Protein backbone atom coordinates (compact mmCIF):
# COMPACT_ATOMS: atom_id res chain seq x y z
CA UNK A 1 0.00 0.00 0.00
CA UNK A 2 2.86 2.36 0.83
CA UNK A 3 4.34 1.78 -2.62
CA UNK A 4 1.02 2.59 -4.24
CA UNK A 5 0.74 5.69 -2.10
CA UNK A 6 4.05 7.06 -3.34
CA UNK A 7 3.32 6.25 -6.96
CA UNK A 8 -0.01 8.05 -6.91
CA UNK A 9 0.98 11.24 -5.16
CA UNK A 10 3.21 13.49 -7.24
CA UNK A 11 3.42 16.62 -5.14
CA UNK A 12 0.50 18.59 -6.58
CA UNK A 13 -2.47 17.83 -4.36
CA UNK A 14 -6.03 17.33 -5.43
CA UNK A 15 -9.01 15.04 -5.85
CA UNK A 16 -9.31 12.47 -8.66
CA UNK A 17 -11.40 14.90 -10.75
CA UNK A 18 -8.74 17.61 -10.58
CA UNK A 19 -10.07 19.83 -7.79
CA UNK A 20 -6.83 21.34 -6.43
CA UNK A 21 -5.91 21.16 -2.74
CA UNK A 22 -2.74 22.76 -1.38
CA UNK A 23 -0.78 20.20 0.63
CA UNK A 24 1.46 21.96 3.14
CA UNK A 25 3.57 21.07 6.16
CA UNK A 26 3.57 22.35 9.73
CA UNK A 27 7.02 23.56 10.82
CA UNK A 28 8.79 24.97 13.86
CA UNK A 29 12.48 24.75 12.89
CA UNK A 30 14.87 24.72 9.93
CA UNK A 31 15.02 20.91 10.21
CA UNK A 32 11.22 20.77 9.85
CA UNK A 33 11.45 23.02 6.79
CA UNK A 34 13.91 20.62 5.18
CA UNK A 35 11.69 17.60 5.93
CA UNK A 36 8.69 19.46 4.57
CA UNK A 37 10.32 20.13 1.21
CA UNK A 38 11.76 16.62 0.98
CA UNK A 39 8.25 15.25 1.53
CA UNK A 40 6.97 17.37 -1.37
CA UNK A 41 5.10 20.07 0.57
CA UNK A 42 4.00 23.03 -1.55
CA UNK A 43 4.90 25.31 1.38
CA UNK A 44 3.95 25.64 5.03
CA UNK A 45 0.47 26.32 6.34
CA UNK A 46 1.67 26.73 9.92
CA UNK A 47 5.02 27.95 11.22
CA UNK A 48 4.72 27.78 15.02
CA UNK A 49 7.03 30.67 15.98
CA UNK A 50 6.79 30.01 19.72
CA UNK A 51 8.83 26.84 19.10
CA UNK A 52 11.84 29.09 18.32
CA UNK A 53 11.78 30.62 21.81
CA UNK A 54 10.56 27.98 24.26
CA UNK A 55 13.61 28.53 26.48
CA UNK A 56 13.96 32.31 26.14
CA UNK A 57 13.82 33.96 29.58
CA UNK A 58 13.40 37.44 28.07
CA UNK A 59 11.77 38.69 24.89
CA UNK A 60 14.17 38.03 21.97
CA UNK A 61 15.25 41.22 20.20
CA UNK A 62 13.76 42.05 16.81
CA UNK A 63 17.12 41.16 15.21
CA UNK A 64 17.26 37.80 17.01
CA UNK A 65 13.70 37.06 15.92
CA UNK A 66 14.43 38.04 12.33
CA UNK A 67 17.41 35.65 12.28
CA UNK A 68 15.40 32.79 13.80
CA UNK A 69 12.51 33.22 11.34
CA UNK A 70 14.84 33.63 8.35
CA UNK A 71 16.46 30.29 9.13
CA UNK A 72 13.09 28.53 8.83
CA UNK A 73 11.84 30.64 5.87
CA UNK A 74 14.96 30.45 3.70
CA UNK A 75 14.34 26.92 2.32
CA UNK A 76 10.82 28.06 1.30
CA UNK A 77 12.01 30.86 -1.05
CA UNK A 78 9.28 31.37 -3.68
CA UNK A 79 6.83 29.20 -1.72
CA UNK A 80 3.98 30.17 0.59
CA UNK A 81 4.50 30.07 4.36
CA UNK A 82 1.91 31.04 6.97
CA UNK A 83 3.75 32.40 9.99
CA UNK A 84 1.74 32.24 13.17
CA UNK A 85 2.42 34.93 15.75
CA UNK A 86 3.36 33.72 19.24
CA UNK A 87 0.85 31.24 20.64
CA UNK A 88 1.91 31.31 24.28
CA UNK A 89 -0.08 30.11 27.24
CA UNK A 90 -2.03 26.96 28.16
CA UNK A 91 -0.15 23.92 26.76
CA UNK A 92 2.73 26.12 25.41
CA UNK A 93 3.90 28.47 28.19
CA UNK A 94 6.68 30.94 27.24
CA UNK A 95 8.75 32.16 30.21
CA UNK A 96 8.96 35.75 28.89
CA UNK A 97 5.20 36.01 28.40
CA UNK A 98 3.93 34.43 31.57
CA UNK A 99 0.74 35.95 32.90
CA UNK A 100 -0.82 35.67 36.34
CA UNK A 101 -1.70 32.14 37.54
CA UNK A 102 -5.07 31.13 36.14
CA UNK A 103 -7.47 28.40 37.28
CA UNK A 104 -8.19 27.43 33.63
CA UNK A 105 -5.18 28.30 31.43
CA UNK A 106 -6.82 26.91 28.27
CA UNK A 107 -9.63 29.42 28.81
CA UNK A 108 -7.29 32.15 29.95
CA UNK A 109 -4.98 34.81 28.57
CA UNK A 110 -3.31 32.87 25.75
CA UNK A 111 -2.52 33.35 22.06
CA UNK A 112 -3.66 36.70 20.66
CA UNK A 113 -5.09 37.60 24.08
CA UNK A 114 -1.51 38.10 25.32
CA UNK A 115 -0.95 40.57 22.49
CA UNK A 116 -3.85 42.70 23.75
CA UNK A 117 -1.90 43.07 27.02
CA UNK A 118 1.48 43.47 25.27
CA UNK A 119 0.88 45.01 21.82
CA UNK A 120 4.55 46.00 21.59
CA UNK A 121 5.57 42.33 21.63
CA UNK A 122 3.23 41.67 18.68
CA UNK A 123 4.45 44.72 16.75
CA UNK A 124 8.11 43.78 17.19
CA UNK A 125 7.36 40.22 16.09
CA UNK A 126 5.43 41.39 13.02
CA UNK A 127 8.32 43.69 12.05
CA UNK A 128 10.79 40.79 12.41
CA UNK A 129 8.59 38.49 10.30
CA UNK A 130 8.16 41.07 7.53
CA UNK A 131 11.91 41.71 7.31
CA UNK A 132 12.73 37.97 7.40
CA UNK A 133 10.23 37.47 4.55
CA UNK A 134 11.92 40.16 2.45
CA UNK A 135 15.35 38.70 3.21
CA UNK A 136 14.46 35.12 2.25
CA UNK A 137 11.99 35.51 -0.61
CA UNK A 138 9.42 33.22 1.04
CA UNK A 139 5.81 34.24 0.27
CA UNK A 140 4.85 34.99 3.84
CA UNK A 141 1.41 35.47 5.36
CA UNK A 142 0.90 36.18 9.05
CA UNK A 143 -1.77 34.61 11.19
CA UNK A 144 -3.00 35.10 14.76
CA UNK A 145 -3.82 32.23 17.15
CA UNK A 146 -6.77 31.95 19.53
CA UNK A 147 -9.14 34.51 18.01
CA UNK A 148 -12.71 34.67 19.34
CA UNK A 149 -14.42 37.57 17.53
CA UNK A 150 -14.41 39.42 14.19
CA UNK A 151 -13.34 42.57 16.10
CA UNK A 152 -10.25 40.74 17.37
CA UNK A 153 -9.52 39.60 13.80
CA UNK A 154 -9.83 43.21 12.59
CA UNK A 155 -7.51 44.43 15.37
CA UNK A 156 -4.85 41.91 14.33
CA UNK A 157 -5.24 42.50 10.59
CA UNK A 158 -4.83 46.24 11.03
CA UNK A 159 -1.59 45.82 12.99
CA UNK A 160 -0.29 43.24 10.51
CA UNK A 161 -0.99 45.52 7.54
CA UNK A 162 0.55 48.49 9.34
CA UNK A 163 3.70 46.37 9.81
CA UNK A 164 3.80 45.73 6.06
CA UNK A 165 2.52 42.15 5.97
CA UNK A 166 1.21 41.15 2.51
CA UNK A 167 -1.53 38.88 3.85
CA UNK A 168 -3.17 38.68 7.27
CA UNK A 169 -5.27 35.79 8.50
CA UNK A 170 -6.55 34.20 11.68
CA UNK A 171 -6.77 30.74 13.12
CA UNK A 172 -10.22 29.43 13.85
CA UNK A 173 -9.79 27.64 17.15
CA UNK A 174 -12.86 28.76 19.07
CA UNK A 175 -16.49 27.88 18.29
CA UNK A 176 -17.22 31.63 18.55
CA UNK A 177 -14.92 32.36 15.61
CA UNK A 178 -16.46 29.55 13.54
CA UNK A 179 -20.01 30.65 14.30
CA UNK A 180 -19.20 34.16 13.00
CA UNK A 181 -17.40 32.75 9.95
CA UNK A 182 -18.61 35.32 7.42
CA UNK A 183 -17.97 38.38 9.58
CA UNK A 184 -14.61 36.98 10.62
CA UNK A 185 -13.47 36.26 7.05
CA UNK A 186 -14.61 39.71 5.95
CA UNK A 187 -11.84 41.18 8.15
CA UNK A 188 -8.94 39.07 6.90
CA UNK A 189 -7.41 37.55 3.77
CA UNK A 190 -7.73 33.91 4.88
CA UNK A 191 -8.43 31.62 7.82
CA UNK A 192 -6.90 28.38 9.01
CA UNK A 193 -8.79 25.99 11.24
CA UNK A 194 -6.80 24.72 14.23
CA UNK A 195 -8.73 21.53 14.84
CA UNK A 196 -6.72 20.58 17.94
CA UNK A 197 -8.00 23.55 19.90
CA UNK A 198 -11.32 23.82 18.07
CA UNK A 199 -12.08 20.22 19.07
CA UNK A 200 -11.26 20.82 22.73
CA UNK A 201 -13.38 23.97 22.91
CA UNK A 202 -16.28 22.48 20.94
CA UNK A 203 -16.66 19.42 23.17
CA UNK A 204 -15.36 21.20 26.31
CA UNK A 205 -12.73 18.47 26.71
CA UNK A 206 -9.14 19.36 27.65
CA UNK A 207 -6.82 18.25 24.82
CA UNK A 208 -4.16 17.32 27.44
CA UNK A 209 -6.48 14.83 29.19
CA UNK A 210 -6.01 11.39 27.66
CA UNK A 211 -9.24 10.10 29.17
CA UNK A 212 -11.14 12.60 27.00
CA UNK A 213 -9.45 11.60 23.72
CA UNK A 214 -12.73 10.34 22.21
CA UNK A 215 -14.31 13.79 22.62
CA UNK A 216 -11.23 15.37 21.03
CA UNK A 217 -11.53 13.06 18.01
CA UNK A 218 -11.63 15.38 14.96
CA UNK A 219 -14.38 13.20 13.45
CA UNK A 220 -16.85 14.56 16.02
CA UNK A 221 -19.85 15.73 13.99
CA UNK A 222 -20.11 18.98 15.98
CA UNK A 223 -16.56 19.88 14.95
CA UNK A 224 -17.33 18.96 11.33
CA UNK A 225 -20.38 21.24 11.41
CA UNK A 226 -18.26 24.20 12.50
CA UNK A 227 -15.81 23.43 9.71
CA UNK A 228 -18.74 23.28 7.26
CA UNK A 229 -19.78 26.79 8.34
CA UNK A 230 -16.28 28.03 7.55
CA UNK A 231 -16.27 26.22 4.21
CA UNK A 232 -19.59 27.83 3.22
CA UNK A 233 -18.35 31.30 4.18
CA UNK A 234 -15.11 30.70 2.29
CA UNK A 235 -17.10 29.88 -0.85
CA UNK A 236 -19.37 32.90 -0.48
CA UNK A 237 -16.57 35.39 0.17
CA UNK A 238 -14.04 33.80 -2.17
CA UNK A 239 -11.41 33.62 0.58
CA UNK A 240 -9.30 30.56 1.31
CA UNK A 241 -9.86 28.46 4.44
CA UNK A 242 -7.40 25.74 5.37
CA UNK A 243 -6.93 23.24 8.16
CA UNK A 244 -3.65 23.06 10.08
CA UNK A 245 -4.60 20.84 13.04
CA UNK A 246 -4.04 17.09 13.37
CA UNK A 247 -7.28 16.44 11.47
CA UNK A 248 -5.46 17.28 8.23
CA UNK A 249 -3.09 14.34 8.77
CA UNK A 250 -5.88 11.72 8.82
CA UNK A 251 -6.09 10.53 5.19
CA UNK A 252 -9.83 9.73 5.17
CA UNK A 253 -10.74 12.85 7.11
CA UNK A 254 -8.61 15.05 4.83
CA UNK A 255 -10.98 14.26 1.95
CA UNK A 256 -14.00 14.99 4.13
CA UNK A 257 -12.49 18.39 5.03
CA UNK A 258 -12.09 19.14 1.33
CA UNK A 259 -15.71 18.07 0.84
CA UNK A 260 -16.63 20.67 3.47
CA UNK A 261 -14.95 23.43 1.45
CA UNK A 262 -11.41 23.53 2.82
CA UNK A 263 -8.80 24.47 0.18
CA UNK A 264 -5.50 23.66 1.91
CA UNK A 265 -4.28 21.08 4.40
CA UNK A 266 -1.19 21.58 6.54
CA UNK A 267 0.19 18.67 8.52
CA UNK A 268 3.29 16.97 9.85
CA UNK A 269 5.52 16.27 6.82
CA UNK A 270 5.44 12.51 7.36
CA UNK A 271 1.69 12.44 6.72
CA UNK A 272 1.84 14.14 3.30
CA UNK A 273 2.23 11.08 1.03
CA UNK A 274 -0.67 9.15 2.58
CA UNK A 275 -2.95 12.20 2.62
CA UNK A 276 -2.05 13.13 -0.96
CA UNK A 277 -2.77 9.59 -2.14
CA UNK A 278 -6.06 9.30 -0.24
CA UNK A 279 -7.36 12.59 -1.63
CA UNK A 280 -6.65 11.44 -5.18
CA UNK A 281 -8.71 8.25 -4.66
CA UNK A 282 -12.08 10.02 -5.00
CA UNK A 283 -13.70 12.90 -6.84
CA UNK A 284 -14.88 16.07 -5.10
CA UNK A 285 -18.61 15.15 -5.27
CA UNK A 286 -17.78 11.83 -3.55
CA UNK A 287 -15.94 13.63 -0.76
CA UNK A 288 -18.89 16.02 -0.46
CA UNK A 289 -21.27 13.07 -0.05
CA UNK A 290 -18.95 11.51 2.54
CA UNK A 291 -18.85 14.81 4.46
CA UNK A 292 -22.61 15.16 4.41
CA UNK A 293 -23.00 11.60 5.70
CA UNK A 294 -20.42 12.11 8.47
CA UNK A 295 -22.06 15.28 9.76
CA UNK A 296 -25.31 13.45 10.51
CA UNK A 297 -23.69 10.78 12.72
CA UNK A 298 -24.16 10.45 16.48
CA UNK A 299 -20.45 10.53 17.30
CA UNK A 300 -16.93 10.24 15.92
CA UNK A 301 -16.99 6.47 15.25
CA UNK A 302 -20.30 6.72 13.43
CA UNK A 303 -19.04 9.63 11.35
CA UNK A 304 -16.07 7.58 10.20
CA UNK A 305 -18.29 4.61 9.31
CA UNK A 306 -20.81 6.74 7.46
CA UNK A 307 -18.09 8.48 5.45
CA UNK A 308 -16.54 5.13 4.49
CA UNK A 309 -19.94 3.74 3.50
CA UNK A 310 -20.72 6.79 1.37
CA UNK A 311 -17.41 6.37 -0.48
CA UNK A 312 -18.14 2.67 -1.14
CA UNK A 313 -21.60 3.34 -2.64
C1 LIG B 1 -4.50 23.66 16.60
O1 LIG B 1 -4.93 24.08 17.68
O2 LIG B 1 -5.12 22.83 15.89
C2 LIG B 1 -3.20 24.11 16.08
C3 LIG B 1 -2.80 23.80 14.86
O3 LIG B 1 -2.41 24.84 16.92
P1 LIG B 1 -1.61 24.18 18.14
O4 LIG B 1 -1.71 22.68 18.01
O5 LIG B 1 -0.23 24.71 18.01
O6 LIG B 1 -2.35 24.72 19.32
MG1 LIG C 1 -4.02 25.76 18.65
Image: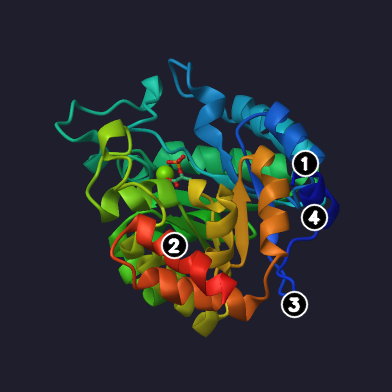
Sequence order check, earlier mark of 4 and 2: 4
- Front of the two marks 3 and 1: 3
Question: For the point 31% across and 32% down, which residue is it?
Answer: 210
Near mark 3 (Cα within 10 A), the count class, few <14, some 14-19 or many ≥20, is: few
Sequence order check, earlier mark of 1 and 4: 4
Q: Is residue 58 visible in this depiction of the protein?
A: yes
Near mark 4 (Cα within 10 A), the count class, few <14, some 14-19 or many ≥20, is: many
Q: Name the residue under label 2.
A: 305
- Front of the two marks 2 and 3: 2
Q: Where is residue 200 in the image (x, y as percent from the top left)?
A: 30, 47
User: Alpha carbon of mark 3 to alpha carbon of mark 1: how far?
Assistant: 23 Å
Q: In which quarter of the image is residue 276?
A: bottom right
Q: In which quarter of the image is residue 228?
A: bottom left
Question: For the point 72% across and 66% down, which residue is it?
Answer: 14
Which element type, helix, strand or loop, lies under badge 3? loop
User: Alpha carbon of mark 2 to alpha carbon of mark 3: how far?
Assistant: 24 Å
Which element type, helix, strand or loop, lies under badge 2? helix
Label of residue 17 in the image: 3
User: Alpha carbon of mark 1 to alpha carbon of mark 4: how far?
Assistant: 11 Å
Residue found at the far left of this picture = 103
Question: For the point 76% across and 75% down, which residue is it?
Answer: 18
Which element type, helix, strand or loop, lies under badge 4? loop
User: Alpha carbon of mark 4 to alpha carbon of mark 3: how far?
Assistant: 14 Å
Does mark 4 have its CB less than 8 Å from ligand 1? no
Q: Mark 4 points at which residue?
A: 9
- Front of the two marks 1 and 2: 2
Q: Is 30 or 264 nearer to us in this picture?
A: 264
Which element type, helix, strand or loop, lies under badge 1? loop
Q: Mark 1 points at which residue?
A: 39
Q: In which quarter of the image is the C terminus?
A: bottom right
User: Alpha carbon of mark 1 to alpha carbon of mark 2: how far?
Assistant: 30 Å
Sequence order check, earlier mark of 2 and 3: 3
Amino acid sequence: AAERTHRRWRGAGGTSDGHPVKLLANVGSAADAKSALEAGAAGSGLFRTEFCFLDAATEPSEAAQRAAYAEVLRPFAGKPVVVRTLDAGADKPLPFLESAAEPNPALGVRGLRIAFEHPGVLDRQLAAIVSAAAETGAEVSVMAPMVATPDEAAWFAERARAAGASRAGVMVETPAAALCAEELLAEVDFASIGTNDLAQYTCAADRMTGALAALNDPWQPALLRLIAALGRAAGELGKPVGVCGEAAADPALAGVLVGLGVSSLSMTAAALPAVGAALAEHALPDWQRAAEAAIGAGGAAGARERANAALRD
